[in-house]
Image (spheres, rainbow, N blue to C red):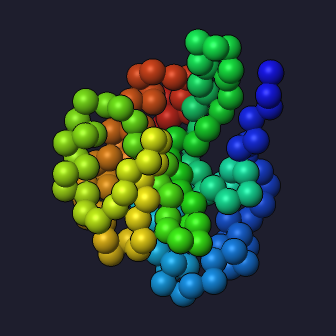
Amino acid sequence: MAKNKTTETEVSVVDFINSYVDNEQKKADSFRLIELMQEWSGFEPRMWGPTIIGFGSYHYKYTSGHEGDAPLLGFSPRKPEFSLYVYTPAKDNKHLLDNLGKFKMGKACIYMKKLSDIDIPTLEKLCKASIEYLNEHHECACREN
């Protein structure tokens, strides 16, 4: 079975942002997202793989037998746009997307150009709903809070 490439690392989140992000607005948005996600999740930011900043963790196991750990919430300040790992298939999440702002939806993440494109209170609701969903459906570090 393939080993999961996206695992928690010891790399400094601040060092990653300062060396990887070359746009001042994206840097400011990254540090603001860290503040918000840390507040909403109750967890310190940690690097997951080479480019994902994650908060907390949960354990998943698919019917195929593949299993691993992933952050409860996370984002990556990729060159073209941010990837937000905050969406789960909870019943109210689709409705929340209507009020989120300017974004594109991928299979498992939300893409946005800048934080000002997004409605922050709606993002908070999405993040908290995702943590609640993961807590109900997976072995989750959020149960310890």
Residue 17, quarter of picture: bottom right
- Answer left or right for 36 relative to 90: right
- Answer left or right for 80 relative to 129: right
Q: In this view, does 65 lie above or below 121?
A: above
Q: Nearer the viewer, residue 109 or 44?
A: 109
**Total numbered labels placed on residues in the image:** 0
On the question of residue 144 being in view, the answer is no
Residue 114, quarter of picture: bottom left
Dividing the image into 4 quarters, which one contains the N terminus? top right
Q: Where is residue 98 in the image (x, y as percent from the top left)?
A: 19, 51
Q: Position of residue 110 (x, y in %)?
A: 42, 53
Residue pictured at 43% horizontal, 59% vertical: 111
Residue pictured at 73% horizontal, 78% vertical: 19
Q: Position of residue 18 (x, y in %)?
A: 68, 79
Q: Is residue 80 above or below residue 90?
A: below
Residue pictured at 79% horizontal, 28% vertical: 2
Q: In this view, does 141 lie above or below 117?
A: above
Seen as rendered, the residue at the extreme bottom is 24
Q: Where is residue 16 in the image (x, y as percent from the top left)?
A: 71, 70
- Answer left or right for 62 relative to 88: right
Q: Which of 143 and 34 is in front in this view?
A: 34
On the question of residue 18 being in view, the answer is yes
- Answer left or right for 136 relative to 51: left
Residue pictured at 47% horizontal, 75% vertical: 29
